Image (tube, rainbow, N blue to C red):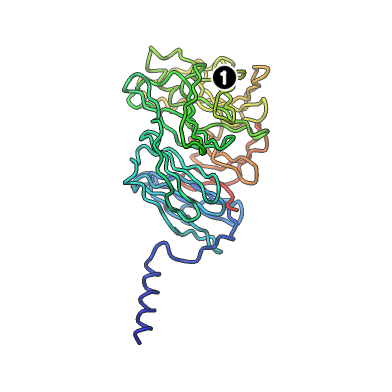
């Protein structure tokens, strides 16, 4: 009788444990993330599918909450929850249902506000970056156990206290290096750094260094990848472009450029293109896709009149063009105008995917890249824009 009571108690404990359950690590799936504006604020959702679906509907997806970032490695999704200061590992079962299996709390280690990306190196080696606090935390993504807490050089700021920089994406470089492009989103029309910057973490020496390039200002915290050869590029930021229109002392800075980043984290001294000059644009919004010498660019026309209210700046009308960075010529790509703002969200089976927002019809899509001039609609995201797609395998 006592044995039965103990067994019953154990089963109850397992049923109440949110991290219990059989792990289905042999399941391949397409992982998709979306964000939806709701009465409670912007909410993030994650869904798993047997193949690339026609639609991604929040009602069929796993609610993550707000203030989150999605990642995946192998056959597991990982989600950073900024409100809780924790990283949670998930598994996908044979019915493509998602469940949490384990988590790591970082609240006592670093501030959630200083979070700046997760990088996976192997089944046993991964890192969480809190560069604004001068900390990097090593962990085992299989067991979700913390390895070491590493003190590193803090993320550099400009000379003025108003300047604020950040990282949010990480890329594996050469010889054990992890590259983290540094970006800025100056609040209250603050100042911005006048150099492009990339943080470089050496997994062998456990040190962080910073690469700088004065040919353009600080840009976006996500590198663009050339899907023809894997080259990485530091690209311009619409957040910095907006600031230029409202800070006379910085309005002439070169912000709309494109720099190549070598695999050791340094900038290629032999490559720089001033996209704003080539397009005779007012400002560059985004570098969307790169394939060889062809670069798909979204920009604001020279004749656009900026609004007095900076809050209305992002409602600017834009154009898309294919820039030949060797010949320094361009062709307009009007076929993509109807999608509004387009941005990369991941890749599946070597093919890059993008998402959009700001269309006149209010619809959201995942688009797959056939080449730099053709982005075909693949998935409709119901109710909100896409943020992530990958194959778990």
Residue 360 seen anywhere in this rendered image of the structure: no
The image quadrant where one finds the N terminus is: bottom left
Q: Position of residue 132 (x, y in %)?
A: 37, 33
Q: Residue at x 53, y 55 (%)?
A: 48
Q: Position of residue 321 (x, y in %)?
A: 60, 24
Q: Residue at x 63, y 22 (%)?
A: 323
**Count of picture labels:** 1
Q: Residue at x 40, y 52 (%)?
A: 104
**Residue of label 1:** 275
Q: Residue furthest front?
A: 205
Q: Position of residue 117 (x, y in %)?
A: 45, 40
From the viewer's side, name the closer residue of 248 and 385. 248
From the viewer's side, name the closer residue of 14 and 149. 149
From the viewer's side, name the closer residue of 108 and 318. 108
Residue 324 seen anywhere in this rendered image of the structure: yes
Q: Position of residue 184 (x, y in %)?
A: 42, 27
Q: Residue furthest bottom?
A: 1
């Amino acid at each position: 009788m006592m044995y039965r009571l103990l067994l019953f108690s154990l089963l109850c404990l397992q049923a109440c444990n949110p991290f219990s359950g059989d792990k289905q690590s042999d399941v391949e799936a397409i992982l998709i993330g979306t964000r939806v504006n709701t009465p409670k604020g912007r909410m993030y959702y994650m869904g798993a599918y047997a193949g690339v679906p026609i639609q991604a509907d929040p009602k069929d997806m796993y609610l993550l909450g707000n203030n989150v970032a999605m990642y995946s490695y192998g056959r597991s999704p990982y989600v950073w929850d900024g409100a809780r200061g924790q990283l949670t590992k998930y598994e996908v079962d044979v019915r493509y249902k998602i469940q949490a299996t384990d988590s790591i709390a970082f609240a006592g280690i670093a501030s959630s506000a200083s979070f700046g990306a997760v990088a996976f190196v192997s089944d046993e080696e991964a890192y969480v970056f809190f560069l604004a606090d001068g900390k990097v935390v090593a962990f085992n993504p299989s067991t979700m156990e913390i390895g070491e807490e590493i003190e590193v050089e803090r993320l550099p700021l400009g000379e003025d206290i108003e300047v604020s920089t950040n990282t949010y994406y990480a890329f594996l470089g050469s010889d054990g290096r992890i590259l983290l492009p540094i970006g800025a989103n100056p609040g209250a029309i603050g100042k911005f750094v006048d150099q492009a910057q990339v943080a470089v973490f050496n997994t062998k020496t456990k040190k962080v260094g910073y690469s700088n390039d004065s040919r353009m200002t600080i840009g976006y915290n996500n590198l663009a990848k050339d899907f023809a050869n894997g080259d990485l590029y530091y690209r311009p930021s619409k957040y910095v472009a907006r600031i230029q229109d409202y800070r006379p002392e910085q309005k002439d800075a070169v912000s709309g450029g494109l720099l190549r980043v070598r695999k050791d984290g340094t900038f290629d001294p032999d490559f720089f293109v001033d996209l704003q000059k080539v397009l005779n644009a007012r400002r560059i919004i985004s570098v969307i896709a790169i394939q060889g010498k062809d670069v798909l660019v979204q920009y604001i026309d020279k004749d656009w009149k900026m609004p007095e209210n900076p809050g209305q700046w992002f409602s600017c009308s834009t154009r898309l063009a294919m820039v030949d960075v060797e010949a320094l010529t361009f062709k307009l790509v009007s076929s993509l105008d109807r999608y509004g703002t387009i941005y990369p969200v991941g890749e599946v089976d070597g093919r890059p995917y993008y998402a959009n927002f700001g269309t006149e019809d209010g619809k959201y899509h995942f688009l797959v890249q056939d080449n730099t001039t053709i982005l075909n609609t693949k998935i409709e995201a119901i109710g909100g824009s896409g943020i992530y797609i990958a194959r778990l395998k």
